[in-house]
Image: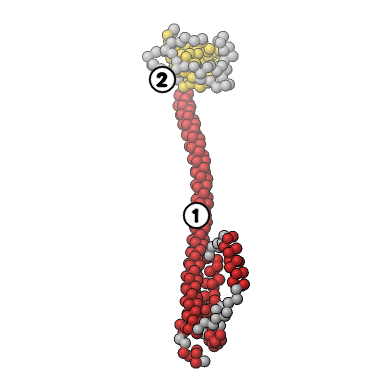
Amino acid sequence: MNHQVNMNHQDWLAQADIYALGALDGDELIAFEAHLAAGCPECEQHLYKTREALTFLPQALEPVTPPPTVKARLLAQITAEAAIQQPVTRLPRRWWWWIGVSALAAAGLLVALSFKLYQTQQEVQRLQRLVASQQTTITEREEALQAERHELQRATEMVATLRAELAKREATLEAEQRERERVERVVATLQGELGERDAALRLLSAPQVNLVRLAGLSPSPRANAHLLWNPAAQAGVLLTSGLPQVPRDRVYELWAFVGKEPVPAGIFQVDEAGHGFLRLPPLPRAKRYDRFAVTSEPAGGVPKPTGPVHLLGSL
């Protein structure tokens, strides 16, 4: 007990290093184990770290295989020493003290190296944990980047779908626009025709209107026409039937005759049934027209008849 009182705590820690090496014996061994049994957390923690450092020490040393000659020499030396009986010499007490101090110093050096190795091992483990943490962060960022790529791909596909839908709607709108323009043209044509028919009806409502019948000649013997002629207005309306359709580069042309002099009175086309309609433009009023004829001429009409006569009639 007095031995424990006289020792300071640094001495106990030094004995803990020797105890971890298994080199503590005698009264010092009994005293140190009694100190541990009395309860010393600092010594127990120091002893635990020292033993753990000693555990890692063999792993840090690279194994070295000695040459065969060293092994043979060592065995020969052991055999020779065993054959020689030397008297046992008891060393003086101070020699044992120096041996103990040297062993303690060696143990302390070994413990220091072991603790340094332990710190290195701890640093390696810390770096390994740091690398693992960074790897986890990189993996999470890659997963987030992949998710963003998928979202971008989905948005790109959505934009492509919207563009296709927009193009379809634009095409539909253009088609509707073209149809509207066609309908407008048809309406304008019908309105023009309606205006012409209204004008023709007003023209025909005059009491001085004459009906001129035009008969078919050899090119179109089955054709016929009726001309409603207003001599006061020098205008009229021609309705034909049975005329054959002519090529696109030709038209039918009506002629009003003053004696033997022909005057152009308008051009027209016929439908598949041979029906034609022509509202005559106002003709020169200074002349008196007594005959009418229809010929086929080049597209646009001509100032004098050049083609065959299809219809002919007189007042």
- Which of the two discs, 1 and 2, sits closer to the camera? 1
Please give the name of the residue rendered at 48% of the width and 28% of the height, measured from the top-left corner. Answer: 193
Measured as percent of width and height from the top left, residue 272 is found at 57, 21
The residue furthest left is 286
51 to 168, vertically: above or below: below
Label at residue 282: 2
Asked whether residue 261 is in view, the answer is yes
Please give the name of the residue rendered at 55% of the width and 71% of the height, measured from the top-left corner. Answer: 55
Q: Secondary structure at mark 2?
A: loop
Measured as percent of width and height from the top left, residue 203 is found at 45, 24
- Local crowd at mark 2 within 10 Å, few (<14), some, or many (≥20)? few
The answer for how far apart the CA atoms under marks 1 and 2 are is 84 Å
- Local crowd at mark 1 within 10 Å, few (<14), some, or many (≥20)? few
Can you tell which quarter of the image residue 241 is in? top right
Please give the name of the residue rendered at 60% of the width and 76% of the height, measured from the top-left corner. Answer: 85
Measured as percent of width and height from the top left, residue 140 is found at 51, 59
On the picture, is 83 further left or further right than 295?
right
284 to 197, vertically: above or below: above
Three-letter residue code for mark 1 = Leu
Residue situated in front as seen by the camera: 84 or 186: 84
Residue situated in front as seen by the camera: 306 or 178: 178
The residue furthest top is 260
Q: Secondary structure at mark 1?
A: helix
Residue situated in front as seen by the camera: 127 or 278: 127
- Colour scheme in use: secondary structure
Three-letter residue code for mark 2 = Pro
- Counting residues from the start of the chain, the first of labels 1 and 2 encountered is 1
Asked whether residue 239 is in view, the answer is no
115 to 229, vertically: above or below: below
63 to 169, vertically: above or below: below
Q: Report which residue position mark 1 lands on.
A: 145
Residue situated in front as seen by the camera: 170 or 112: 112
